[in-house]
Image: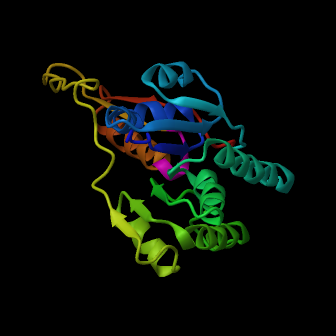
Amino acid sequence: MATTVKKILILTNLDIGLYNFRGEVLRALIEEGYELHIGLPDGEMIPKLVQMGCVFHETELERRGTNPLEELKLIKKYGELIDEVKPDLGLTYTIKPNIYGGMAFGRRGIPFITNITGLGTAVEGNGALQVFTQALYRIAMKKVSCLFFQNKYNARYFRSRKIGVGKHTLLPGSGVNLEKFSYIEFPKESEPISFLFISRVMREKGIDQFLEMAKVIHKEYPETEFHILGFCEDDD
C-alpha cells in the first residue's frame, strides 16, 4: 500500500524571514518527503521558496494593521486556505499567523506548532492592545500541540499569563548557516574597529541602545565606525 505524503501548512507574515531564517528547516522537511505549503504575502523571495519545493498560497495581511474588518478577512482567508490544503500539520510564525492561524487550526482539529521568536509591542506591556492580544493568544493556544520559544524570558511571560501552559519547549535559538554566513577574521589593530547592527530598525531590537553606545565609544575612540544594516519599522 502506497504511503500518503503528509502535508504541512506554514503560515507567516514575511517571505524574507521565512527564506533567510527558516530555509534550512524547509529544505529538511522537503527532503524528508513532506509536501510543504506556505501561506504569506507575495515578495521577492517567493520564487526561491517555490524553487526550493514549497507550494505558495498568496495570503495578504497588514503586519501592523488593526482594522477589524481586515483582521476578520484574514481569519476567513486562513480558514479557507486550511480547508483547501487539508494539511496534516500546521506551523505558524509571528503574531497574526500564530493567533488567527492557531484559532483556525484548532477549530478544525488539526495539530499545529507555534514558534514565538519574540513578543513585540502588540504583546508585551499592559495597555489595552497588549491585554487584548494576550487574550487572543490565550484562546488561540488552547489546542496547540507544541509552543516553541527561543528565550527563557518569552517562555516565562507566556507562562505567567497562562498561555499554552504544559506545551512549552525552549529552543537554543534559530542557529546560523555557517556556509552561507562564513567566518571572517577580526580586523587588525591598525584598522578601524567597526560595529555592525543587523536587524529591523526598531526600539524592540535595541537600536536606541546601539546609538547610545556609539556616542559613548566614538567620543573616546573617534576612529571607530558604526554601521546599521536593516530597514525601518517604526514611524517615529
* Quadrant location, the C terminus: top right
Q: Nearer the viewer, residue 228 or 49?
A: 49
Above or below, 99 relative to 184 = below
Q: Can residue 85 be seen from the camera position used here? A: yes
Question: Which stretch is magenta?
Answer: 200-205
Quadrant assignment, res 14: top right
Could you tell me if residue 121 is visible in this image? no
Residue farthest to the front?
Answer: 1
Which of these two is toward me, 202 or 4? Answer: 4
Horizontal side of 105 relative to 184 (left or right) equals right
Taking the spot 51% from the left edge, 80% from the top edge, the residue there is 162
Q: Residue at x 43, y 39 (%)?
A: 5
Residue 223 occupies which quadrant of the picture? top left
Quarter occupied by the N terminus: top left
Q: Residue at x 15, y 24 (%)?
A: 185
- The residue that appears at 34% across and 65% down in the rendered structure is 169
**Residue 174: x and y, percent?**
33, 46
Against 197, residue 156 (above or below) is below
Colour mode? rainbow
Quick check: 20 above or below 113? above
Above or below — where is 42 with respect to 159?
above
Q: Position of residue 129 (x, y in %)?
A: 71, 66
In the rendered structure, the answer to whether residue 143 lies left or right of residue 179 reads right
In which image quadrant can residue 28 be found? top left
Membership of 37 in magenta stretch:
no
Total tally of numbered discs in the picture = 0
**Foreground of the two, 34 or 133:** 34
Residue 186, horizontal then vertical, whole percent = 16, 27
